[in-house]
Amino acid sequence: MKVRDSLGPEAFRGEKADMPVLYDRLLKLKEMFNSKFGSIPKFYVRAPGRVNLIEQDLLIAVEPVETYTLQLANTNPLYPDFSTSATNIQIDKTKPLWHNYFLCGLKGIQEHFGLSNLTGMNCLVDGNIPPRSGLSSSSALVCCAGLVTLTVLGMNLTKVELAEICAKSERYIGTEGGGMDQSISFLAEEGTAKLIEFSPLRATNVNLPSGAVFVIANSCVEMNKAATSHFNIRVMECRLAAKLLAKYKSLQWDKVLQLEEVQAKLGISLEEMLLVTEDALHPEPYSPEEICRCLGITLEELRTQILSPNTYDVLIFKLYQRAKHVYSEAARVLQFKKICEEAPENTVQLLGELMNQSHMSCRDMYECSCPELDQLVDICRKFGAEGSRLTGAGWGGCTVSIVPADKLTSFLANVHKAYYQRSDGSLAPEKQSLFATKPGGGALVFLEA
Ligand code: ADP
Ligand code: MG
């Protein structure tokens, strides 16, 4: 089996020895594929989750077929088989069933090349990223499906193009995501964290300090972002805050969608943007009527032209808090990178402080935490983390903590005892709930020899 650098056709690299665990999983997948479809896959695609875990990823074994039927199967029996005509892809936004995430990736590529129909394929999906836990299993699936489709078509795209297409097409599931997850799934590189920036999309290496380890801990509270409106409400609050800020600064506000755009248009620093936010917005929640008054639009226009369908009926928008969170978080990201570059003696402590501030802001200003996450963050700090925060969208899912390397063993043991071994036995965590992680590589294609 050959490993193909996903996107350049000429670049083959690595063989079995590089990735023994992955290789074993691929062999198992090949056997299961054979018993399911009665044939051997032609290639495999792998895409990682978001905190970018070496061995936690999503794999798809693929065989293009002559019929125009797309058949999807999953090694996990919780995800039922699915089959559809490849000439008529429909994504049901009202029910975020697993196969719809695959269809998002497929549709993104199909539309990019302006193809109305595709050849069929048989696919077997095998994922081990904890789902609905903020590690972006959804984007791994969308990105994997996008790369599967590209490979079946025999086309080429750059990683950046693929990331942009998949970021856009995951929105077919109904979540208004920004593109961070899809970007890192393609642009990740082993051994380095990445700072992701947009317009234009780019990824810069950030070298993490050697004396510390990043540990993921799952709160075991699951939250499907497409099945509830929490996630989209935040996106809409940010969108409305951006429009009000743009209007306040006499910019053309109707085209503005993101807070970042207002800062870019004004050409000022994040710190200055925080001051503008204080002047322009008030901490009291906004009603839809007040927003309409500020923007000079009707309620009907607000609903149909700005809000997403699952946020039509929201009555309270906390614009000030959401904007403060977003700008301060962006500033913390830059500070994090700067500290990593300058690497002062107390690097780990400084990074930890930023992560703690970030969690507080998520909890109090963005309100995307939950009691279990807050408790887990406290436990992690108590047992040696210099900093701890929720990761991913929130409302459940995982925390990431920075732990001095020499405290790792006791940290893992104590957190396990304090959070996962509950006396009432209410938590039966999977073995993947608490683990140290390192930056791993991005999406790849493996060709069957
Ligand atoms: P996350 O934080 O993991 O991205 P989301 O709520 O965005 O959580 O998406 C989770 C959904 O992705 C699951 O409910 C499921 O439909 C899909 N999914 C994740 N992993 C798999 C998998 N291994 N096989 C099939 N579908 C998966
Ligand atoms: Mg997701």
Image (cartoon, rainbow, N blue to C red):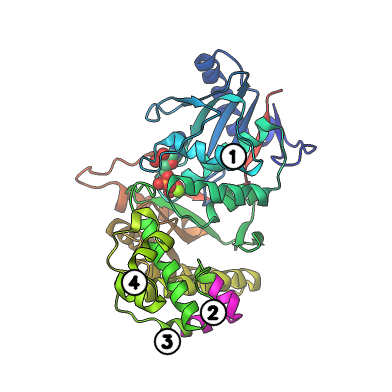
- Above-or-below relation of 266 to 208: below
Name the residue: 53% across, 46% down: 169
Question: Which dot marks residue 208?
Answer: none
| Residues drawn in magenta | 261-275
- Secondary structure under tag 3 reads helix
Residue 232: quadrant of the picture: bottom left
Is residue 186 one of those drawn in magenta? no
How far apart marks 4 and 2 lie (CA) works out to 22 Å
How far apart marks 1 and 2 lie (CA) works out to 37 Å
- Is the residue marked by circle 2 packed among few (<14), some (14-19), or many (20+) residues within 10 Å? some
How far apart marks 4 and 3 lie (CA) works out to 15 Å
Q: What is the x, y in percent for residue 126?
A: 50, 31
Q: Amino acid at mark 3?
A: Asp
Dot 2 corresponds to which residue?
A: 251
Dot 4 corresponds to which residue?
A: 318
- Secondary structure under tag 4 reads loop
Q: What is the x, y in percent for residue 121?
A: 58, 24
How far apart marks 2 and 3 lie (CA) works out to 16 Å
Q: Amino acid at mark 2?
A: Leu
Asked if the residues shown at circle 1 and circle 2 are in contact, with their CB atoms under 8 angstroms apart, the answer is no
Name the residue: 66% across, 41% down: 113
Residue 395 showing in the rendered view? no
Residue 425 showing in the rendered view? yes
- Secondary structure under tag 2 reads loop
Question: Which dot marks residue 146?
Answer: 1
Quarter of the image containing the N terminus?
top right
Q: What is the x, y in percent for residue 385?
A: 43, 63
- Secondary structure under tag 1 reads helix
Q: Amino acid at mark 1?
A: Gly
